[in-house]
Structure formats: structure tokens, C-alpha cells
Amino acid sequence: MFEASRAKALNKLDNFVENNLGEYSRLRNFDFGPEKRSNVSCLSPYITHGIINEKEVIQKSLNKFSFSKNEKFIQEVLWRTYWKGWLELRPNVWTDYLLELNKTKNEFQNNQDYLSAIEGRTNISCFNEWVKELKDNNYLHNHTRMWFASIWIFTLELPWQLGAEFFMQHLYDGDAASNTLGWRWVAGVQTQGKHYLASEWNIKKFTNNRFQNIKLNENAPPKVSEKSYQIIKQDFNNPPNIEDKNLLIFENNLSFEITDFKDNNFKKIYLVSNSNENRSIKLSEKLVKFKSLLIEDQEQRLKNKSSDCQIININEITNIENCCGLYPTVGENLDFINSKNLKIDFLYRNFDQLAWQYCNKGFFNFKNYIPKIVSTFN
Ligand SMILES: Cc1cc2nc3c(=O)[nH]c(=O)nc-3n(C[C@H](O)[C@H](O)[C@H](O)COP(=O)(O)OP(=O)(O)OC[C@H]3O[C@@H](n4cnc5c(N)ncnc54)[C@H](O)[C@@H]3O)c2cc1C
């Protein structure tokens, strides 16, 4: 489903905009099955890795339809931006998640219900199919992610932290912000007291009756968390002088040619790959491979333009002097940099600098600023 190249990503985007975008808001909630995904874009594995970016996607959609016809699609694309910004302002949510995950993993390593869930051997057949689909295709439809997480938490009664880890291990679009906050939202700890309960009728309706006899706990109360998170004020300012420095690019920005810094002169570009030994969440082999193919694709495109570039392991960045880096965002790469106390001048995208200032409250507040954000694209 997902070929690891920018050329393929652009084809997918063009094809979706041309043929399916018009029906997106009417059909997007349906999961018609893994072979019938044309009602959604399936662009998330590429957007997450910066192979294509939000601005590019939104601009192409606006070349086809007006803002009002496209509003739902643009909102969905910017949900991702909102979650990113929300987490940037409260990075402790990620660090606390990893601490809780570590503790829970020890408690559940031999738990039979947990092992049955990740092997797709529960007595809920739709859930078992989704486990298989997640491992085979490394993607799940958004509605299915909501049902999956809800069944995991409220019917199978497993900790959300383990479910979020399971997604991160397999999803090609696995992202610290969208994933952690998506699971917190379903559990009812993101918007305190509001959880998402999957129900039999809803699954039947939006899967076109592909599943029958789904016995779920449809009355569970939301999970409760004692913790609340204040905004930690962050500066997202770019350093004054970046010319002739070395540039580090992490796995979230793998299309240098569409970044704000494409016209700057860098001495050399280092494409940084991160192996499982440095990750708190160990990724599946297929996901590791997908990431390395995307990095190689970027290397090839840079070499075609005669840029001096090299792929390095994240352990090697300690040896690179006089460098700056495209900001890797809250997640495993930033954790590595912080754990080694490395002082790297980060370069932030203009788009994030603008959008993240509106992520201090809920998405309904953020939505008010969408026209303003989009108006800066021209
Ligand atoms: C529990 C849970 C975990 C999730 N984990 C991730 C994750 O790790 N990475 C990830 O990218 N998304 C995640 N999502 C959000 C969403 O499910 C996916 O982005 C979407 O399904 C991707 O498919 P698509 O590209 O076909 O989406 P489309 O419907 O075509 O949407 C276009 C783009 O908008 C963005 N988008 C759409 N819906 C959402 C959303 N609800 N939240 C954030 N961004 C959205 C994505 O970048 C997507 O590619 C999660 C949602 C839930 C409920």
C-alpha cells in the first residue's frame, strides 16, 4: 500500500485530489475494508515523515475545490498540526507516557489478555482482524483506530499505554503526538471526563455490516488521571546565522526540497537514522525498513541535485561540529538529543511557528485560526 518514495507519495496525493477528495466529507468515516481505501487519502505515512507536507497537501486540495468545499479535509490535515503543537507546549505528557509505559510493560509482560490482544486471539472477531491488518498493512482507518483503542481500553480492560505502544510499533505513520494524544482522548484523560465508547451499531454501520455480533462494554466510565499539564512556554525561534553550517535532518522532515531552508547554503547535510537500540518503543522490522527506505530516497534526491549528503546513525551526531538541525519535534529523536545533552540549534518551520501558538486551548478554538493559517500559504 505504501511505497517508500516522494514520487509515489505525490502520485497518491494527485490521484486522491483528482478522484476522491470531492466525496471525502461524506464518506471519510466509512471503513470499507483494507482493499477499499479510496474514500480517505492514506497520506499519513508520508506526512508524518515530511515526505510531503501539510501546506503542499492543502494547497493541492485548494487548487481543485474552494475552501468551503474542502473545509473538512483541511481540518483533518490540521488536526495533526494541532496535536503536534499541543504536545510541544506540554512535552511532559510524552515523558510521563514513556515512564508509565515502562512500568505497565513490566506488570503486563506475561498477562494472557494482553498477549491474546496483540496476537489477535480475543473473542472479538473485528478486533482480531484489525490486529492482523495493522501488522500486515501498517495502517488502520481513523474510525477503526478509535474503535480499536476503545475496545482495548473499555472491553478488554487493558492499559491505554500498552495499546499506544502497539500502534507505534506497527503504524507507518506512528507519531508521538497524534498517537499518544489520540489514545489519551479515547481513554478520557485528554479531555478529562470525555471518552470515546465504541458501539456495535456504529461499527456495523460504518463498516457496511462487515462484522456481526460484536459484544462490547458500551457503558464503561472514562479513565481518570490525577495529572494535569500546564503549558511550558517554549521558544520556537530560529537562530540568526545558519549559512555554511552542517545540517541534521531527522525522520520527520525527509523532503529538504520543500522546507523553508531549501535556499540556504549548508556545508553538508546529514540524514539521521535512529535504530531500535536508542528507542524506548521498539519498532517492527517492517517499520524500520520503511523508514530506512524513505531516508535513502531522500539521499538519492539530494545527490541528484549534487548536494553533499550522508546517512548517519543518531549515535554519530555527537561527532558533528558546527551544526544545526531541522527540529525533530517531541519524540524519540529529541529524547536522544536531550539524553546526551547535545546543544543543537533547531530550525522551526514557519508553518509550525504560526500554528503552534494557537494550540494552547482545545481544537475548537484552534479551528477559528484555520483560515488565517491557510491564508499565509500564498
Ligand atoms: C488512537 C489513535 C491513534 C492515532 N495514531 C496516529 C499516528 O500515530 N499518526 C498519525 O498520523 N495519525 C494518527 N491518528 C490519526 C488518524 O487516525 C490518522 O492520521 C488517519 O487515519 C490517517 O489516515 P489518512 O491519511 O487516510 O487520513 P485522511 O482522513 O485522509 O486525512 C488526511 C490527513 O489528515 C491528518 N489526520 C486525519 N485525521 C486525523 C486525526 N484524527 N488526528 C491527527 N491527524 C489526522 C493525517 O495527517 C492524514 O494523513 C490516530 C488516531 C487515533 C484515534
Image (cartoon, grey):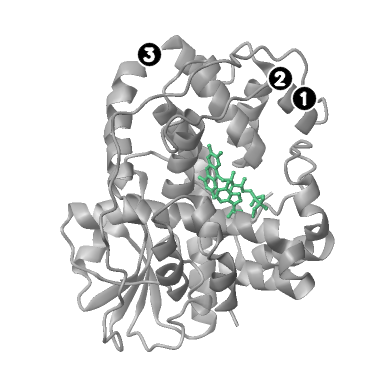
Q: What residue is shown with label 3? A: 110
Q: Looking at the image, is mark 2 or mark 3 earlier in the sequence?
A: 3
Q: Residue at left 37%, top 71%?
A: 348
Q: Could you give the CA–CA distance between mark 2 and mark 3, rounded to whole angstroms?
A: 30 Å
The local secondary structure at tag 3 comes to loop
Q: Looking at the image, is mark 3 or mark 1 earlier in the sequence?
A: 3
With respect to residue 39, does 315 lie above or below?
A: below
Badge 3 density bin: few <14, some 14–19, many ≥20, Cα 10 Å: few
Q: Are marks 2 and 1 in contact (CB under 8 Å)?
A: yes
Q: Depth check: 274 or 68 in front?
A: 68
Q: Are marks 3 and 1 in contact (CB under 8 Å)?
A: no
Question: What number is the disc on residue 204?
Answer: 1
Q: What residue is shown with label 2? A: 200
Badge 1 density bin: few <14, some 14–19, many ≥20, Cα 10 Å: some
Q: Amino acid at mark 3?
A: Asn
Q: Amino acid at mark 1?
A: Lys
Q: Amino acid at mark 2?
A: Glu
With respect to residue 27, does 328 lie above or below?
A: below
Total numbered labels placed on residues in the image = 3
Mark 3, mark 1: which one is toward the viewer?
1
Badge 2 density bin: few <14, some 14–19, many ≥20, Cα 10 Å: some
Q: Depth check: 365 or 261 in front?
A: 365
Mark 2, mark 3: which one is toward the viewer?
2
Q: Residue at left 69%, top 22%?
A: 126
